[in-house]
Image: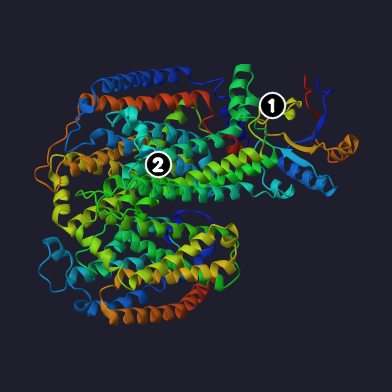
Amino acid sequence: MMMMRLIPGAWGDEMRLSVEAATLLTPLAAAAMVPVLIGMAAVYPWVGDRSPSAFKLLWLSPVPFITRTLLRFGAQWWLGHRMRARRGQTVTAGAGVVLMPVLTSLVAVDWLMSLEPDFASSAFGLEFMQREVIIAFCVLLLLRLGMGREPRRLGVLGGLLLTLLLLSAYFLFLPFFVIWSSNLAPNVEWYARRWGTGWEAVAWTFGLLAGVPLLALLLARARKSASWLKPLSAAVILSSLLQLGWTVLPGRGGLAVLAFCASVVGLGLLGVALLPMALRHRVRARLPAEARR
Amino acid sequence: MADTGRLFAVLAAFDTPERLVEAVRAVRAQGFAQVDAFTPFPVKGLEEALAFRDNRVPAAMLIGGIVGAAGGFLMQVGTNLDYPLRIGGRPLIAVPAFMMITFELMVLGAVLAALAMMFMANRLPRLHHPVFDADGFDLSADDRFYLAILADDHFDRNEAGRALAALGPDAIIDVRERPRS
Amino acid sequence: MNARLNAADRVLRLPPRFPAPRAWWICFGFALSLLGLFLASVAWLFGHGPGIWGNNIPVGWGFPIANYIWWLGIGHAGTLISAMLLLMGQGWRNSLNRFAEAMTLFAVTCAGLYPILHLGRPWLFYWMAPYFNTMNVWPQFKSPLTWDFFAVLTYLIVSTLFWYIGIIPDLAAARDRARKMRWKIFFGLGALGWRGQATHWARWQQAYRLTAAIAVPLVVSVHSEISLLFAAGPVPGWVSTVFPPYFVLGAAFSGFAVVSMLTVWLRWMLGLHTLVTLRHLNMLGCLLLATGMMTAYGYAAEMFTAAYAGGKEAETLFDRFVGPYAWSYWGAILFNFVPLQLLWWRRWRVRPILLFLIGLSATIGMWMERYMLLVSSLYRDWLESSTGTFHPTFWDWSLFAGTIGLFLTLFLLFVRFLPVISAFEVREEAVDG
């Protein structure tokens, strides 16, 4: 969203309203975090643990954790609000592209990496952001294709999806490769758990679900046609969600898997229901101004 | 000297790219098949007007990429089998470690194949070409866009000349090949 | 539009009628003297071996590898400007891409020389290549050093070809523009008989755009691979998963810094104000700022993770802050990120002198960063026994200055004899409006 303002081009115009609508969903995402904050002790092994290093002890304790989470959502809402108002956008976007990656990386560490306190990967924030962006992009692409007229320059959006997929592959492979090469204990164990029974199949599935669209999008025809892009972006969403599960769940038992699936489906349905509403809301909000012109 | 050789083409010079594209469309509509153009820079819409359909370059790139990747990967597998180096507790065929060279050689194969195909399909490089003898042929000028009707076996100079003259070009030039001495 | 067409025409006439012979000769003389230093250093090295440098166990890499990475990083910006902005349809790149790509070639040349000179027996460098030999052995393909050989070689070949097919149409135009026979022959041979035929253009565009499309991932892969020279070894301060993207961005950052410097310099020396406008400087400033801030993210992520992971990683981090090489850490932060902040304001971005100075500062800062990453990790390993400091000698510095001379010499020859700006693309853009 912020990037769109800073990088001029055809793609911004095509997606603008959908993106603005999506920022309206920030409270929903924040609300989804509430149960996690309440049940923190059950979710994170570090709550109440006095053993780790001083830095970790300070960093991973409930109060800073909640503060960072609140900061992240607050910033997201505030930036979204400013962008929707379409005033001072360049400044807002400039602040946004600096603020959001930092805050998002911090919460990525908090929410997901700290599930296994011994694992430390400096690319984790980037991996997380990349996954967020690709999910968001695919959802919005589907929304855009599902509603209203066909975008005029679909090829650009297809090309963007291809770029995002290449980046995903990059961010998935290289951290693994660095850890595989150095072969140092806690980090390698993290991957070893994700390569055990069952999880290996999951890894292959999400690899295929993203790999096939990647190869398909190399064809210019696939990039330009809505009927190709729809199933491809759906596959990519599914793949990213599986990948998220693969990152979070191993070693946490069957109940966690069930809970994950249930919450993904629930939140997904809620999002699907609310996004078109939000879009219509945005369209209405913009109409008078455009009618006057 | 230029009058002695076999006729290669008849050129018509236009001063803007838009007029050139229109002229190409008009000439092709009259049934001339061997039409080409000479421009100092790529002109938008000219490919469509000439009905250019040649995907040999992308195809060569795809094949080159596949050959490069397969060659790169198999080279590493083959050499490891031929002279086993057991390093750092890795399996002998350590697929992640082979990915880098596979990727690089894929890129190299793809680029070399695409460029080689581009040169071959364009019949380049060459030292001389008949159009270089045409009066005023100058790729550094911004107001000379040439339409060419190439001569083939049943080529009628007068018919082509009339068709070109009807378009109102700035000049009409005959291009002849140099006689072989 | 007409002003731009005239300016494009002027670019084609630059080599035969060079506008600034005196400035050029002064620069060239300076470059040649540094090149002389380069030759002397290499001769001394061949005579006496790498012992003339400060490299020793445990810091076996020292200057050669730090400088190698630095040069290669600079090179990447040329490809990125040219290829990525071409694909994104950013027409303003046409005024910058040609000399940025030339910069790539010469920087990669300098980079490629370093590991070879570092070998100790440089004449055996071809042992890196897999070829059938009487010893019946093959290279060790699980080592980042072998990947490196392939990556840099591929990169050099691809960027040379990309630059060359880009310059062919301009050579043809310069051939037709030239009055004197020797220039006609010179450009004519280089143009390979290009005659601007429409079908040729169509195939040329296919090939050019596809090469650009594959060149971007190539750049990313090459510098990620360089980062693996570090990250793939179990050395504290090096095993950091953010290294690949962080190195790529740092490379782009240092490269854009050098492109900014070259732009300002060429614009002034050759009077290219109509083609390289304030808008270009503004965009360069933005690019520099963006890549710089992303590099800063890399610093932050690495620092945070080291502190978070604790143990030896945190010790190395702390040592970088206050240890004997702290000057390079704080120097990198200072030179890279402090002057950079001025670029948030458009007012500062369009000041050529200021842009030049910020570029210079970032170039120095990135050199310090490469140095810091290399030395501060190697000199104190996991084992107490393998510690030992590194001090560069005179020959370290002289070879470094010498490669700068090599770069400048090649670049000045390019400026003198070839079209420095992609004239046909500028004209295409001007006519399309």
Q: Secondary structure at mark 2?
A: helix
Q: CA distance from mark 2 to mark 1?
A: 37 Å
Residue C359 at x, y = what percent? 35, 37
Left or right of B78, for residue C49? left
Residue found 37% across the figure and 22% down from its top? C31
Amino acid type assigned to the residue bearing label 1 in the image: His
The answer to whether residue C176 is above or below residue C316 is above
Q: Quadrant of the C terminus of chain C?
A: top right
Question: What chain letter is assigned to the residue under label 2?
Answer: C
Closer to the camera in the image, C326 or C272: C326
Q: Which residue is mark 2?
A: C150
Residue B6 at x, y = what percent? 83, 28
Q: Quadrant of residue B127?
A: top right
Left or right of C113, for residue C53? left
Residue found 38% across the figure and 25% down from its top? C406
Q: Which residue is mark 1?
A: B128
The answer to whether residue B158 is above or below residue B51 is above
Q: Quadrant of residue A203?
A: bottom left
Q: Say how the picture is coloured.
A: rainbow
Q: Secondary structure at mark 1?
A: loop
| Labels 2, 1: one chain | no
Left or right of A74, for residue C9? right
- For label 2, the crowd category at 10 Å Cα-Cα, with few meaning under 14, some 14 to 19 and many 20 or more, is many
Closer to the camera in the image, C185 or C235: C235
Residue C46 at x, y = what percent? 28, 22
- Viewer-nearest of discs 2 and 1: 2
Residue found 56% across the figure and 29% down from its top? C11
Question: What chain letter is assigned to the residue under label 1?
Answer: B
The answer to whether residue B78 is above or below residue A33 is above
Closer to the camera in the image, A125 or C159: C159
Amino acid type assigned to the residue bearing label 2 in the image: Phe
Closer to the camera in the image, A205 or B27: A205
